[in-house]
Image (tube, rainbow, N blue to C red):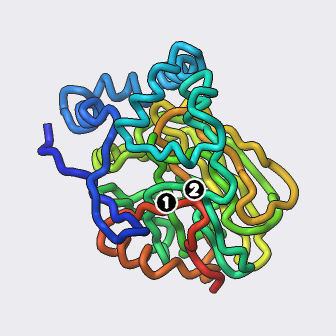
């Protein structure tokens, strides 16, 4: 098995680096880094069966006892919860929790793009044709991720927001606009953790995913992609048509790590300087939904 390398993330609010706590880390490393596990990897991560079974369990009252241990292990701030912890009837009710109003303030300016979710962010200010390469990962292709609409984004820009089990798992629109198209893709359930990305599966081109095309007011047409991952019971989009305002809820992920990818046309936006600098150094930045993310070019 490969030598363990910690996942280091920069906390945007403090500027400090920290080592990420990974639920089930030993199993992820075994599945993706141990040469003897290729058959298991195929059975567990390419099939929806186990992820759906986990989704059923975490939707059931049987899972309620897992809530406190997750809060403790992941150091989750319960003061942000809109509803009291004891009101959650299952782990997934806790997982898709709402936050108190005002917990995620945001810039309302028309030329500001905000982060679509809480998560660890990598930005790619200008794609080399259609290619992007996450931290410790292999090159990925927009054409594989978005096979029917990729051409308009060739040479554009892209951001990955990787959600972990500790994060608030509802995602929001980063700017105002009009939904013009949407599509779902069935696929595998590979982990989106950097441990898996470094092992070579085409997470963005093979995993279950959904996209929404949003004609924005000031930043051209962007594509908003939700990527499912191991243990994700489902991607639930709660706003699927019509006009949207900045920070309107778009949907939520049920249990598991998952990812939001936002893709912009060439020359449409400029990502925030700290995100660009950290990404260029190969480091993810922990960002909260609503924080400044980019500006209209």
Q: CA distance from mark 1 to mark 2?
A: 10 Å
Q: Residues within 10 Å of mark 2 (few under 14, many from 20)?
A: many
Asked if 71 appears above or below 224 in the picture, the reply is above
Describe residue 58's horizontal placement relative to residue 66 as left or right. Answer: right
Q: Looking at the image, can residue 205 be seen?
A: no
Residue 27, percent from left and from top: 28, 29
Q: Quadrant of the N terminus?
A: top left
Residue at x 28% of width, y 36% of height: 25
Residue at 86% in and 61% down: 243
Q: Is residue 104 left or right of residue 129?
A: right
Which element type, helix, strand or loop, lies under badge 1? strand
According to the picture, the residue beneath numbered tag 2 turns out to be: 117
Badge 1: how crowded within 10 Å, few (<14), some, or many (20+)? Answer: many
Quarter where residue 59 is shown: top right
Which residue carries the number 1 mark? 160
Q: Quadrant of the C terminus?
A: bottom right
Q: Nearer the viewer, mark 1 or mark 2?
A: 2
């Amino acid at each position: 098995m490969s030598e363990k390398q910690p996942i280091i993330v920069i906390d945007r609010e403090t500027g400090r680096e920290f080592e990420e706590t990974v639920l089930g880390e030993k199993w992820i490393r075994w599945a993706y880094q141990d040469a003897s596990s290729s058959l298991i990897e195929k059975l567990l991560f390419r099939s929806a069966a186990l992820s759906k079974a986990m989704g059923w369990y975490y939707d059931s009252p049987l899972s309620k006892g897992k809530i406190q241990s997750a809060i403790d292990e992941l150091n989750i701030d319960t003061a942000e919860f809109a509803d009291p912890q004891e009101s959650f009837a299952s782990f997934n009710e806790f997982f898709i929790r709402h936050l108190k109003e005002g917990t995620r303030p945001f810039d309302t300016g028309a030329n500001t793009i905000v982060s679509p979710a809480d998560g660890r962010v990598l930005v790619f200010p200008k794609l080399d044709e259609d290619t992007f390469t996450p931290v410790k990962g292999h090159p990925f292709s927009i054409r594989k991720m978005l096979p029917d609409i990729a051409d308009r984004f060739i040479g554009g820009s892209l951001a990955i927001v990787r959600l972990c089990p500790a994060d608030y798992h509802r995602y929001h629109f980063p700017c105002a606009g009009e939904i013009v198209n949407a599509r779902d893709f069935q696929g595998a359930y590979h982990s989106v953790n950097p441990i898996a990305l470094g092992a070579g599966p085409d997470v963005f081109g093979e995993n279950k995913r959904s996209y929404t095309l949003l004609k924005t007011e000031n930043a051209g047409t962007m594509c908003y992609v939700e990527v499912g991952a191991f243990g994700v019971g489902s991607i639930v989009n709660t706003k699927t048509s019509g006009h949207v305002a900045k920070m309107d809820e778009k949907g939520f992920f049920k249990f598991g790590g998952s990812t939001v990818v936002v893709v912009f046309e060439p020359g449409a936006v400029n990502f925030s300087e700290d995100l660009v600098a950290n990404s260029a150094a190969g480091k993810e930045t922990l960002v909260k939904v609503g924080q400044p993310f980019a500006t209209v070019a």
